[in-house]
Image: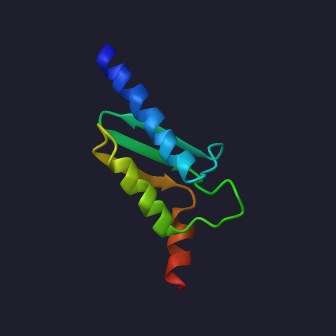
Amino acid sequence: MEHSNQEKYRAMQEIKGVLVRHRIDLEQVFYSYIRGTAYLSGKIKKDSREVLTLSVLMVIVDEIKRLRNVNYVDYSDLLNLNELERRRAKR
């Protein structure tokens, strides 16, 4: 059990690090880690005036997937995922 808690803590810190590097507003996005899966929910957006694109979201997801002990990233509960997809379709 102790190893599992350490793994979860480490994964959560690494996920947060990816989000911070991409200047994601941590007050609006929620993240968690359970048994190899990283979950993103809430609203994902930059903490600056810079607009987040679907391409940038995919880069973030790929970086999280490369973290130790992360096998899958579930971002289907992001509240603005449809908005990002629509914005990309308009291009």
Above/below status of 6 relative to 20: above
Rendered image quadrant of residue 36: top left
Find residue 48 and report its horizontal and vertical position in percent.
70, 58
Q: In the rendered view of the protein, which quadrant contains the N terminus?
A: top left
86 relative to 9 in the view: left or right: right
Q: Residue at x 61, y 57 (%)?
A: 45
Give the farthest residue toward the bottom. 91
Residue reaching furthest to the front = 21
- The residue positioned 52% from the left and 67% from the top of the image is 82
**Residue at screen point 37% across, 20% down:** 5
Residue at 31% across, 22% down: 4
Q: Quadrant of residue 90?
A: bottom right
The vertical placement of 6 against 30, above or below, is above
Judged left or right of residue 30, residue 60 is left
Marks counted in the figure total 0
- Direction top: furthest residue: 2
x and y percent of residue 56 in the render? 49, 64
Colour pattern of the rendering: rainbow
Place of residue 38 in the rendered image (x, y in percent of width and height, measured from the top left): 39, 42
Residue 77 pos. (x, y %)? 48, 52
Of residue 29 and residue 19, the one placed in the foreground of this image is: 19
